[in-house]
Amino acid sequence: MSQPLYQSQLRILLSQPLNKLLRLEVAFCEIQDPVMPFISGLTSLSALNLMCNRVTDEGCEKLQHLTNLTQLTLSMNPLVTDKTLESLTGLTNLTALNLNFCKLVTSNGIAKLSKSLGPSLKQLDMIGCDRALTDVKTRPLILLAEDSKIQARMISMVLNRYNFDVEVATDGEMALEMFQTSPKYDLILMDVVMPVMDGISCVKQIREYENLHGLKRTPIIIQTADPRESQRTICLEAGCDEFMSKPLDKTCISLAKELMEERSKIIAKSKRESGSGSSGNDNNNISTARTSTGNTTNTNTNTNQNTNKTNDTKSSKTTSNGISNKPSTT
């Protein structure tokens, strides 16, 4: 592994005739602002990697002279802010920009840059831009049920990297208690084989708790080392939304986002219907097992009798209290 270059060494190197240099990789080189004028003089550069250095907005301002850049990496530069993004608006050839873990960058700065560069910017990486995420929305919260400490730590790190918050339960019983105490989770990632209570039993009890208390359905992805179709069927019948084989990959992230987006749409629709004066029966259609079909039938029959008593008596032969003598067909 090469040692980081000192500022004086970089100045000597960059002062050489490098006018035709197309690509420069100076990641982890402890670069600071005094070196940036030398880098900005390499106007033929099409790719520049400045990952994990100590440049500030003042130093990054010099990047506006590199008009031939198509790829720029500024990830893990903790001093970079929106002012740097303003300096990049003139780089109209830029197609890929990496801002991962530039924690002072905000969504406002990213939006202005994206608008300035337009469709030419094909790839924008912003994992770990905490200030930007806070401006947009609250981080989604995932309940991870995993008995292996190593696996739990690895999965949590991946989810954190993709801007999810994670709370960990070490067995099914603990996961159930956490959910019942505060059913605030946007998604549950459940292991199958765990001590005390297995994942399938936990999923069944979570679904029962949701139905009993009229809660919206929380998406559950179950993970297992057994990829057989029979195991998949068992998991889905227990109430899981998706089944994934270990080890988990980026597909899990995409799937989690899709399930949470669907849940958000259902909740938003429910709120709109409630706000427009939807009847209680409409709400019952959204959350299952709230009332029995018999009670619904009785309510409808009573209503019909009160509004048109004569017709109801002839057609359905109801008693004086409005409940039909005929056996329910539902």
Image: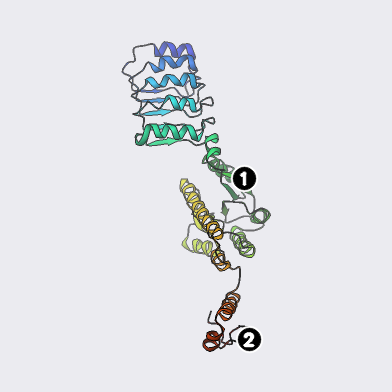
Q: CA distance from mark 1 to mark 2?
A: 66 Å
Q: How is the image coloured?
A: rainbow
Which amino acid, mark 1? Answer: Lys
Task: Find disc 2 in the rendering and name its residue.
Answer: 320
Instruction: Find residue 3 and report its horizontal and vertical position in percent.
Output: 49, 19
Q: Secondary structure at mark 2?
A: loop
Q: Is residue 66 left or right of residue 211?
A: left
Q: Is residue 272 left or right of residue 88?
A: right
Instruction: Find residue 53 and report its horizontal and vertical position in percent.
Output: 50, 23
Which amino acid, mark 2? Answer: Ser
Q: At 55% across and 86% down in the image, what residue appears?
A: 310
Q: Is residue 287 placed above or below 15 in the rendered structure?
A: below
- Label 1 vs 2, first from the N-terminus: 1
From this viewpoint, is residue 3 visible? no
Between 253 and 152, the one lying in front of the other is 253
Find out whether the residues at labels 1 and 2 contact each other: C-beta distance under 8 Å: no
Q: At 37% across and 36% down in the image, what residue appears?
A: 122
Task: Find disc 1 in the rendering and name its residue.
Answer: 149
Instruction: Find residue 233 and report its horizontal and vertical position in percent.
Output: 50, 64
Q: Which quadrant of the view contains residue 22?
A: top left
Between 203 and 77, the one lying in front of the other is 77
Q: Nearer the viewer, mark 1 or mark 2?
A: 2
